[in-house]
Image: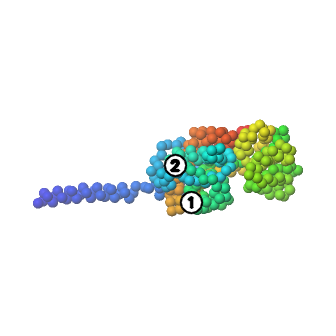
Amino acid sequence: MKKNLGFVAAILLIVGIIYSRSFFLQNFTPDYAETAGSVEQASPAPPVGAVLAPSQPLDLAPLTFPPRSEPLVMPAYTWPPFNLKDKTGRWQGADVEIVEAVLGRMGYRVEWVELPFARALEEMKSAKFPAMAPCVVGGGREEYIFFSEPVASIYSVLWKKKSDDFSWQTYDDLAGRVIGASYYHYGAGFLEAGEAGKFQLDMVAAKAPEVIHFRKLLQGKSDMFICELSVCSYLRYQHAPEFDQVDYAPTGVGPTRPFCFAVSRKYFEGREGQMHAFMDLFNQELAALAKEGERQKIFNKYHMLVQVDEQGSIIVPGEK
């Protein structure tokens, strides 16, 4: 009898050890999806445009939302060379290709839905789409958008004839000049300076105002026009040799503004840990893409005057 009782006690002891070990493993293994947000806050954020460690094979298991079994359906707005459609209707452009490349490395497929820019921004306030094509940070957008590190950048300059050796530093230097502009927000008080009489504004409202500005300049109907550096660099190439005699003055109208991938906070509501995990992976793969030189190749493909240094930081205005 004693022998049998000893045997039973030994069995119970072994079962207890196994149970307790499984209990501790189950309750104290960290869940990356839930801790990703706090880890990100505890670690100092890298500087804008900085490249992180080179891409390593990623353990994608902790990131379960959005699911990879379905394509990511996201709004895109037309703004060449950042976002545009080819003749077959397929989306292309620098931002489209960079975002697709980064998300592809994360295990996602992308489907783009065309929406006007203002409508796309409004949709970020709902849970309809997980994200949208990159846009400028600021203007209160941070309240409903979680932004990535810069995918690209925008930088407004004044374009002129190559034969015009004029240069400027302040709006006072533009006195007496006719300067073409469109109904965009250029920042740095540009439109306000024109309305105050510092120079004469020639406003154009059209679907493709930049092309009209190029032609008015060449026809002598204006002295200069304002346009984002990469946008008009791309258009100058697309319309060669017609626009070959147009160049830009290096002084910028306002600072460089980062163009960042935009994630809907509402879409991830209740899953904030997954939102941070998703963006952590996006930033890591974006940094790796930049360091490998692939992002610069895409910029060059679209004749964009955006350069990046060895650390992946964006340099503007770039070389002519």
Count residues near mark 1 (Cα–Cα under 10 Å), then give few for <14, some for 14-19, many for 20+.
few
Residue 318 appears in which quarter of the rendering?
Answer: top right
In this rendering, the count of numbered labels is 2
In the picture, which quadrant includes the C terminus?
A: top right
Q: Position of residue 189 (x, y in %)?
A: 77, 56
Q: Is residue 110 visible?
A: yes
Q: Is residue 70 left or right of residue 225?
A: left
Residue 315 appears in which quarter of the rendering?
Answer: top right
Q: Residue at x 60, y 53 (%)?
A: 113
Q: Residue at x 59, y 51 (%)?
A: 112
Residue under pointer 2:
108
For residue 128, the mark is 1
Q: Position of residue 201 (x, y in %)?
A: 83, 53
Name, please, the residue furthest toward the front: 88
Q: Is residue 25 left or right of residue 309?
A: left
Q: Residue at x 83, y 43 (%)?
A: 218
In the picture, which quadrant includes the N terminus?
A: bottom left
- Viewer-side residue, 130 vs 140: 130
Gap between marks 2 and 1, in whole Å?
A: 18 Å
Q: Amino acid at mark 2?
A: Tyr
Q: Secondary structure at mark 1?
A: loop
Q: Is residue 39 left or right of residue 300?
A: left
Q: Position of residue 226 (x, y in %)?
A: 78, 49
Q: Residue at x 65, y 52 (%)?
A: 77
Q: Is residue 307 visible?
A: no
Q: Earlier in the sequence, mark 2 or mark 1?
A: 2
Q: Position of residue 209 (x, y in %)?
A: 76, 50
Count residues near mark 2 (Cα–Cα under 10 Å), then give few for <14, some for 14-19, many for 20+.
some
Q: Secondary structure at mark 2?
A: loop
